[in-house]
Image (cartoon, rainbow, N blue to C red):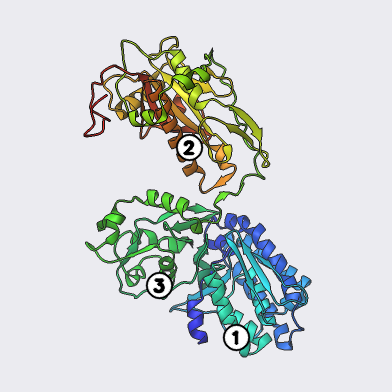
Amino acid sequence: MTAEMTAETTPARTAAQTAAAGSGGQTAAAGTGAQTATNRTAAPTAAAGTDAPTAAAQTSAQTIAAQTDAQTAAAGSGGQTAAAGTGAQTAVVRSGAQTTAASMTAGLAAPAATGTGTARVVRRVRLRRDAVCEPAPAAGRTVRLTAPVGSLNLPDLSAGAREAVAALAFGEHTEEDLGALVAARDGETGLLRWQLTLRRLGMAGMLESSVHAVAGAADEPLARLRPIGRGAALPGPVPDPTRQVKLSRFATAGAEDGALVVRAPGSALAVELGTRAAGLLPALAGWTSPAALAQLPSGLTLDAVRQILRLFDVAGLLAYGSAGQEPEATERRFAQWSALDLMFHSRTRRPSTVAGYGGTYRFGDRFAPEPASPPPFPGEKVALAVPDLAALARTDKPLTEVLEQRRSVRDHDEQSPLTVDRLGELLYRTMRRRQTFTGGDRQEHADRPYPSGGAVHELEVYPLVTQCAGLKPGLWHYATDRHELELVAEPGPATAALVSGARESALMTTDPQVVLLVTARFGRVMWKYETVAYPLILKHVGVLYQTFYLVGTAMDLAVCGLGGGDAADFAAASGLDFFTEGTVGELVVGSRPMTLRQDVGVPRREPKR
């Protein structure tokens, strides 16, 4: 029973030892230090509520602490930060609670190691790095674990189990060491309950699993299974040595907190890779097997490869099959997705796969919120006439008629172009700022004719004019608070590229009279919202498109929303920073001719208007 549970509950990756996985490791250790320190500070108090340790248990903490310090110190130059942190934290535990300090046994079993040659493969577990361990009161037996994705209560824990949870909170250990610790405090009867507790931690996604190559004093982290969101973090069985396998075409890799992290869409788990394990990725781009991967120059043993792929499998990073039999490439439901599109969709529509979702204010303590209005441009200003809304309310077409007449119109009347007054009316009825107010989050909110999540109203509109009576050509900005246009740039190669792109996208034969470039001031949304910030911007763009369509139809204007554009071209034309404010939508607007010359955009089985 114990062996089976041990095999199933290896799920845990470590925070500090990511550092040893290469030059970026020190950043990883530092990046998680604050949260880990919270865990470790809380751990001594948890142990303080336990009964007086037995003589055997009194020596146990010293051994595991020493093992932890030695393993971390041996991890290489990147592991020095982690080693220092582990040593200091162990000292805190020893000084803060003698029970915890004496929790690890001198005669514990050797690490869970397998393999051949000089290097052994060792598996370890620890609490997830963003979890906080809230210890039991002095007379209590319940430990509470809290992470950004939720919390877990562990009631009625024995003294040994409480010490083992405390040990997991400040460092990573083999399951054999933890079992020996519990057995020394609670006897063999407490061991089964501990195995069930450990499995519960894994099922709740509270554990990280790591695989190490240990040779003498050298301890090399190879891979670490890291829970990101909610859900189980229990590695499954090791793959068969000859089974054909490859990296899923949807897997993506990137640098996070100083480590190389590989993720799959829809998975709440990620895998951090050390230097040698990262060398498996090129070989996994094609069909291969664990046995073949063990022959690579990296020198990883077959057992090491199988343990690493075990983590890959539970994180959804692997595809199984063979050449010509690849569901990801042949089945339509998979083939129609690109890796980045599926990752974007999964991240933003599956909250359980991320740590933070929605209005978390993750930058609230780092940056001040951005004001509702951007700073004015220094160029020429053109005040716009204010339309009479009361008169328009009496003369406008009914809403149903406007909805039914709405079309994407790609023809402009070259003989009677759009006027500046008509452009001003369109902007006033769609984009003007009606009022501002400050919310309880210190952010200045705004009110406009169309809705915006959180009232942030991050969108701006830049009319790019080629032909508009009463307004010279150029790139202008509409100041929503003052109802005026500000000249941003005179016509030139950069603005010409924007006009050309809009003309081609709209399938027009001549230049559009006005291109409405819709931008987002990203910080207005990203200061408050996590994970959903960019999709929220795109929703706002869709709302604004329809508002332009309806108002334009009511005004008998030609309006056509575009499906894409080049944000780099806009940055070049406007001089604005690409990462601070950029285009997220475009529409072409002009005067509507009496007769449309193109069938493009007219629904089938309906007459042209």
Callout 3 amino acid = Arg
The quadrant of the picture occupied by the C terminus is top left
304 up-or-down from 601: above or below: below
SS at badge 1: helix
Residue 4 is situated, as x and y percent measured from the top left of the image, at 48, 83
Q: Which residue is mark 1?
A: 191
Please tell me the numbered disc located at residue 540.
Answer: 2
Q: Which of the 4 quarters of the picture holds residue 505?
A: top left
Q: Which of the 4 quarters of the picture holds residue 159?
A: bottom right
Q: Earlier in the sequence, mark 2 or mark 1?
A: 1
Residue 63 is situated, as x and y percent measured from the top left of the image, at 66, 79
Residue 523 is situated, as x and y percent measured from the top left of the image, at 57, 38
Of tags 2 and 3, which is closer to the observer?
A: 2
Please tell me the numbered disc located at residue 392.
Answer: none
Which residue is drawn at the image coordinates 44% and 9% (left, top)? 470
Which residue is drawn at the image coordinates 30% and 24% (left, top)? 410
As measured in the structure, the alpha-carbon distance from the residue carrying label 2 to the one carrying label 3 is: 47 Å
